[in-house]
Amino acid sequence: MENQVLTPHVYWAQRHRELYLRVELSDVQNPAISITENVLHFKAQGHGAKGDNVYEFHLEFLDLVKPEPVYRLTQRQVNITIQKKVSQWWERLTKQEKRPLFLAPDFDRWLDESDAEMELRAKEEERLNKLRLESQGSPETLTSLKKGYLFMYNLVQFLGFSWVFVNLTVRFFILGKGKTFLKYLFFFFFVPGIEPGTLCLQESFYDTFHSVADMMYFCQMLAAVETINAAIGVTSSPVIPSLLQLLGRNFILFIIFGTMEEMQNKAVVFFVFYLWSAIEIFRYPFYMLSCIDMDWKVLTWLRYTVWIPLYPLGCLAEAVSVIQSIPVFNESGRFSFTLPYPMKIKVRFSFFLQIYLIMLFLGLYINFRHLYKQRRRRYGQKKKKVH
């Protein structure tokens, strides 16, 4: 028993350029840590699972590493950082396929490859932004100006969408018949062609557009700033999801509702505007607080959660508005055209609306996937067994 080699518990994680090892030994002083022939050698006196003893282990790495490990001692553990010779993702840590019994993933630092790539890009963007700011002027001044600009933008959007949301809510409860709302909602989504007057809700629905359209026009035109911010690097948001939402909403607002007066008196306007504003009254104040480095946990949870039911419902309401507009556009002939001679085929605008319906649900998938990844990064994911 005296000659038995004791091994400590070792936990590992990786990034594209580095390996991280956490050795579970407390009260360690002057450990012997080296790398020779791509094999890590560790030996130290410390308090581990078998009490106060000498512990050691050896690990032959899957690929080449630099032979200069860097370690940091704490009261409870030894943290070792090792640089890879080639920046790439490893499928496992050790050359041998079977994982040593003392080795396990460090879930506190673990990221899968796609998340690690995002972290690497974020660090690179942060480095480039820092260099750009240093070349342009005082980083503190530019950062303060950027935060002030983003804070004011998000404040204006929050106030605008809040005005729409409160206006529609008050109109519904004062002019509408609240007791029949759920019944109306069922018929609205599952029985096409239902008329607002059928369920006594016409007073609160039929003039929604005329009541809040000006404010919605303002907010949606101003939303173009978000896409521009993402495109020029003012914010780190991806451009494609932001652009898809901007184009989709503005198509519904300016083309479907804005050009056809017959569509402006339909109940679908209420649901589209109400669902849009319900999402934004949580998103914009979250961004406002982020600009001043504040984190209100309740608001953060709402920002990353309420979109789960509201976003698909909003897309469904948009789809209903497009479907209801098809016969209106066919009857009016607006935006339809005839191909030149010799074809002379009349192309109805409804053909493009049907194509848009397919694109609408494709955009739903892209944005839903983007929002889900944001939520997963914020609140983590279930730990999975990895080699």
Image: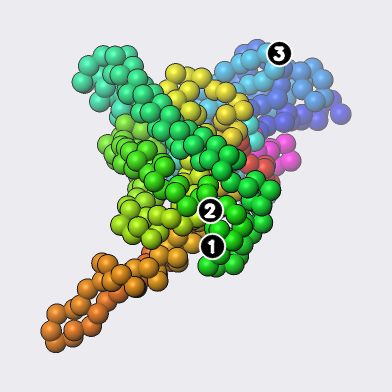
Q: Which residue is mark 2?
A: 202
- N-terminal label among 2 and 3: 3
Amino acid type at mark 3: Asp
Q: Amino acid at mark 2?
A: Gln
Q: Which residues are magenta?
A: 100-106
The dot on residue 49 is none
Q: Is residue 18 above or below residue 261?
A: above
Label 2 to label 1, Cα distance in Å? 8 Å
240 lies left or right of 367 = left
Tell me the quarter of the image containing the N terminus: top right
Q: Is 284 rendered above or below residue 48?
A: below
Asked whether residue 15 is in view, the answer is no
Residue under label 3:
27
10 Å crowding of disc 3: few (<14), some (14-19), many (20+):
some
Q: Amino acid at mark 1?
A: Glu
Residue situated furthest left in the rendering: 341
Residue 128: in magenta span = no
Tell me the distance, in whole angstroms, between the alpha carbons under discs 1 and 3. 76 Å
Q: Earlier in the sequence, mark 1 or mark 3?
A: 3
Task: State the SS at label 1.
Answer: loop
Q: In 3D space, how far apart are the residues under numbered discs 2 and 3 (Cα atoms)? A: 75 Å
Q: Taking 350 as reference, is 347 left or right?
A: left
Residue at (20% x, 77% y) in the render: 338
Judge by depth and name the residue closer to the eye, 263 or 295.
263
Picture coordinates of residue 275 (x, y %)?
51, 46
Residue designated by label 1: 195
Q: Relative to the observer, which residue lies in front, 120 or 311?
A: 311
